[in-house]
Image (spheres, rainbow, N blue to C red):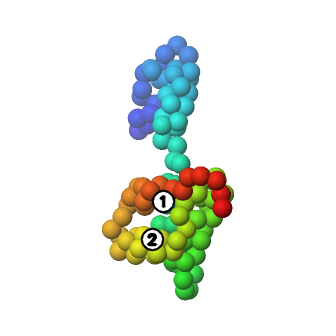
Amino acid sequence: MRWPLRTRRRDQHGRAPGAEPALRLEYLRDALAERTPDAYWRAAALLEQIILLRPLPVRSELFAYGVAAAYLEASGERVDTAYEPWRDLSRDIQALRLTVYDVADRLRSWRVTGPPD
């Protein structure tokens, strides 16, 4: 039995058609630039996973809030850290009403501008 990958046509250098290395690198660079997750998306993914997986016996939601807020702060982003909106977000995540993209949008909406306190 021949493997399907070995049956593809190759050019004189043994490469598959359309596999120019420079073009592939340029395509990958552009794709990564457009799809690189920002700090809010990464914090949202972290927050969602901690809340849903419940790594601690108690208060995983509070731990997730602290970790996500600290992650955003370490990334140079500032958000409103009042607990009530985070609590509501936590409840929505637990009820599976939000995707990670919705969580990231909500975190972005809490962005604080101006000099640090």
Amino acid type of the residue that numbered disc 1 sits on in the rendered structure: Trp
Q: Name the image quarter holding residue 94.
A: bottom left
98 or 21, nearer to the observer: 98
Q: Is residue 105 above or below residue 19?
A: below
Q: Amino acid at mark 2?
A: Pro
Residue positioned 63% across, 64% down in the render: 70
- 46 with respect to 4 (left or right): right
Residue 90: x percent and y percent? 44, 73
Is 37 above or below relative to 24? below
Image point (54%, 56%), residue name = 112
Mark 2: which secondary structure?
A: helix
Residue bearing mark 1 = 110
| Residue at left offset 53%, top offset 25% | 26
Estimate how packed mark 1 is, as few (under 14), some (14 to 19) or many (20 or more) residues with alpha carbons within 10 Å. Answer: some
For residue 78, which quarter of the picture?
A: bottom right
Marker disc for residue 81: none
Pick out the residue farthest to the left.
Answer: 97
Mark 2 → mark 1, Cα distance in angstroms: 9 Å
For the N terminus, give its image quadrant. Answer: top left
